[in-house]
Image (cartoon, helix red, strand yellow):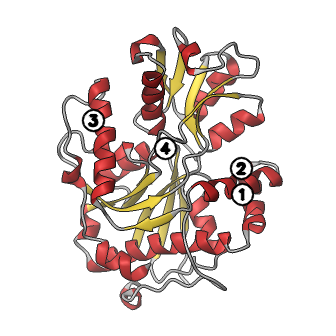
Amino acid sequence: MFRRTLLTSTTALALLLPFATACGGEAGAESSSSSDLSSVTLAVGATGWKNEEAVLKFAGLDDTPYNVKWSLFQGGDQQLQAVRAGALDLASSSEIPPVFAAADGRPNFKVVAVQRGTTLNQEIIAPKGSEVTGIAGLKGKKVGYVQNTTAHYFLYELLKRAGLNWSDVDAKPLLPNDGLAALNGGGIDAFASYGTSVITAHQRGAVTVGSAKDVLSGNFLWSARDSVLKSPAQRAAAADLIARITKGYAYIRDGRQREFAEVVAQATHQPLAQAEKDFRDAQAQRPTKARTVGDDSIASQQKVADAFTDLGALKGKLDVKSFWSHALDTDLEKAL
C-alpha cells in the first residue's frame, strides 16, 4: 500500500462538487496497465472537503498502484492556476476555469474527460430577513460572486434572463469563505456561490434568490497537464483514478447512502438527515458518471466561453476545442 499525503492550498479548503457509477462488494477498479504504475505520483486537485478521497476510502478503492497527492482549493479556478504553475497534474472543475486558464493562448493542459454531476447547491443567496426575494430585486445591490467559476457564469445568465445587465448590480468578486463572511456581516446583499458555502449559508438562515440547477450543464471537467499526457504510465494512472471515483460513487448509491452521509455530515457539519437528503437529491437529479471527450461537451463549453466574451470578461472569441484532447479516451474506456 502506498502512502497518500494531503496538501492544503494557501487559501484553505472549501467546497463540494461531483459524483459517479457502478460496482458491488468492495468496489474494484483495475486498469489494464496498473501493474507498472508503482513509480507514478499524481498531484491531484479537489474542490471540497476531501470528498473524492473520502469516496475512494469508503468504497475500498484508495489502495491505488500509484501515489496520489491531494490538494484542496476553494474553487476550480485555483486548481487550474496550480496546473498552469506546474503544481498539479490533474484538476477537476466546472466548464468555466479552463476557459480563463487558456485565455492567454498558451495553456499547458488539456481537458481529457467529463464527469457528469449535480447542479444543485449552485445558487444566489441572500441573508435571512433580506428584502431581496428574486433576481429582479438585485438591481442596484452589492452582489458577491466567485470569479471565473460557475457562480460567475450563472449570475450573468440569471441576470440576463431577468432582463438585467451585469452593470445593473454592484458585482464583487470574492472567494467562497470571504463571500460567506461578507454576506453574514452585511457587506454584500447577495452572494452567488456553490457547494459547502451555500449549504452553510442556508444553515444560518439564508434564502435562495435564484438557482442555477437549470442553467448549468452538469459537465465537470478533468484537465491534465501536458506532461501527464506525454507519459503512458501517468495517462493510465489518471484514467484509473477518474474511473475509481466514478465506481466509488456507484458503490455508495448501491444502498450505502446513509452510511456515506455519516462521513459527509461529519466533514461538513450538517445534520445527518440533511447530508443524506442532499446526496440522494444530487444523484436523483444527475447520477455522476465519467465519460470520454465528446463533441457535445466541447460545444457546451464553447457556449459558456461565448457568454464570457459577450460579458467582456474575455477579450475575444476563444476556440475551446484547442485545449481538449482524446489522449485519455482509450485508457479511460478500459478503466471504466
One can see residue 6 in this view: yes
In three-dimensional space, the C-alpha distance between marks 3 and 2, rounded to whole angstroms, equals 35 Å
Q: Position of residue 4 (x, y in %)?
A: 54, 71
Circle 4 residue: 75
Asked whether 288 or 205 is in front, the reply is: 288
Earlier-in-chain disc, 3 versus 1: 1
Circle 2 residue: 268
Callout 1 amino acid: Val
Task: Classify mark 3: helix, strand or loop.
Answer: helix
Instruction: Check disc 4: other Cα within 10 Å, few if <14, some if 14-19, many if 20+.
Output: many
Callout 2 amino acid: Thr
In three-dimensional space, the C-alpha distance between marks 4 and 1, rounded to whole angstroms, equals 19 Å
Q: Are marks 1 and 2 in contact (CB under 8 Å)?
A: yes
In three-dimensional space, the C-alpha distance between marks 3 and 1, rounded to whole angstroms, equals 36 Å
Earlier-in-chain disc, 2 versus 4: 4
In three-dimensional space, the C-alpha distance between marks 2 and 4, rounded to whole angstroms, equals 16 Å
Earlier-in-chain disc, 4 versus 3: 4
**Residue at 31% across / 55% down in the picture?**
296
Q: Vertical placement of 167 versus 195: above or below?
A: above
Q: Position of residue 179 (x, y in %)?
A: 58, 28
**Residue mark closest to the camera, 3 vs 2:** 3
**Residue at 43% across / 53% down in the picture?**
219
- Residue 122, picture quadrant: top right
Earlier-in-chain disc, 3 versus 2: 2
The quarter in which the C terminus is drawn is bottom left
The quarter in which the N terminus is drawn is bottom right
Circle 3 residue: 306
